[in-house]
Amino acid sequence: MPLAFLTIGPFAWTLALLALPWVGAKAGGEGAVRLKLSAVAGNLGLGAMLATFVKVIPGFPGLTRSTEAGVLASLGSLYFFWLIMLEGGLT
């Protein structure tokens, strides 16, 4: 059982919650590319949509209560800005 560590511990719930925006961002980016837009636009659009789901839909899982997610969010925003620089040709 190599993935048994994902089913126990406090970090497992955070990883499960992070899968939702990651898969959503990939789908939004792919949809934007098919509409001949930037993939970053699709990622931002779907991220904004998921953020409003947390506020509007009661019981929708949110990552704001997880301290581990705060650290991962900081790393993710650094990675996101790096991707913007690559796509914009600023490097």
Image (cartoon, rainbow, N blue to C red):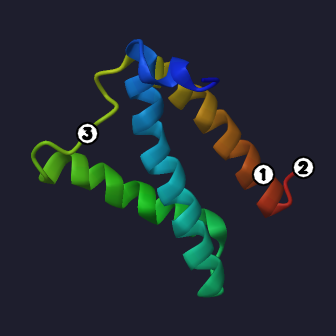
Q: Residue furthest right?
A: 91
Q: Are marks 2 and 1 in contact (CB under 8 Å)?
A: yes
Q: Position of residue 45 (x, y in %)?
A: 45, 65
Amino acid carrying label 3: it is Pro
Which residue appears at 58% of the width and 77% of the height? Answer: 32
Closer to viewer: mark 1 or mark 3:
3
Could you say whether the residue bearing mark 2 is in a helix, strand or loop? loop
Which residue appears at 25% of the width and 39% of the height? Answer: 61
Q: Residue furthest bottom?
A: 35
Q: Which residue is mark 1?
A: 85
69 is higher (above) or lower (below) than 91: above
Q: Which residue is mark 3?
A: 61
Q: Are marks 1 and 3 in contact (CB under 8 Å)?
A: no
Instruction: Measure the alpha-carbon separation of dots 2 and 1.
Output: 6 Å
Q: Which residue is mark 2?
A: 91
Mark 3 Cα within 10 Å, few/some/many (few <14, many 20+)? Answer: few
